[in-house]
Image (cartoon, helix red, strand yellow):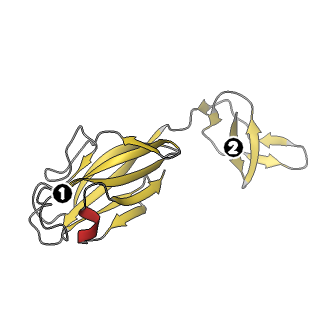
Amino acid sequence: MWFAVANTVLRTVKGAVAPIVSFIWNLNTNLWNTETRLWAALPVTVPYRFAVADSYGDGWNGNQAEVQQEVTPGTWVAYGSFRDAHVDAGIVGTSTLTMIAGAGPSNIYMDMEVGFNYRLVCSVEGSYPAEPEYSIYNELDVLAVALVPGASQWVLGTVQTTFTT
């Protein structure tokens, strides 16, 4: 069962999928105006952009963070794999965020499942932990969360940031 937004009124839509067009609910007739037969499923994943940078300009010096998803309350597992990376950003095909070289920002993308909690955890301690930083942008390119430079975030197992899709 899905809900459709109609002038900010939620209404149950019968069927297995949600409409891809906006409807106007007529409060006088209790019917949809301009109803259509065009239907599509809601997206299961959305692209997120991870912008990595280094305050000194020489890459992350071995520091790495792992993207994790909360699969049940309190249970976190490595999630996804990065794709479409700038030459210096992340490790394509893994859930590891790092910066190979340069100051950045360099972008790398990951498709995130909708409706889950995510976090980034320090998975490898490198040198110069006060330099690495990153910003994560949602599918609308709005900042979801950011990590500013600071040594305390780069201790093995430290949860650096959390966000929900």
Q: Position of residue 76 (x, y in %)?
A: 42, 44
Which residue carries the number 2 mark? 4
Which residue is rendered at x = 38% and y = 40% of the image?
77
Of the image marks 2 and 1, the number of the one nearer the N terminus: 2
Instruction: Give the position of the N terminus as an image quadrant.
Output: top right
Q: From where the camera sits, is residue 162 visible?
A: yes
Q: Is residue 76 left or right of residue 81?
A: right
Q: Identity of the amino acid at label 2?
A: Ala
Which residue is rendered at x = 87% and y = 43% of the image?
30
Residue closer to the observer: 111 or 146 = 146
On screen, residue 119 above or below 104: above
Look at the numbered disc 1 and give the secondary structure of its residue. Answer: loop
On screen, residue 23 above or below 61: above
Task: For label 2, count other residues whose C-alpha is less than 10 Å away and answer few (under 14), some (14-19) or many (20+).
Answer: some
Q: Position of residue 116 (x, y in %)?
A: 50, 45
Which residue is rendered at x = 20% and y = 54% of the image?
98
On screen, residue 86 above or below 82: below
Q: Identity of the amino acid at label 1?
A: Glu
Q: Looking at the rendered structure, which numbered label has been put on residue 152?
A: none
Q: Are marks 2 and 1 in contact (CB under 8 Å)?
A: no
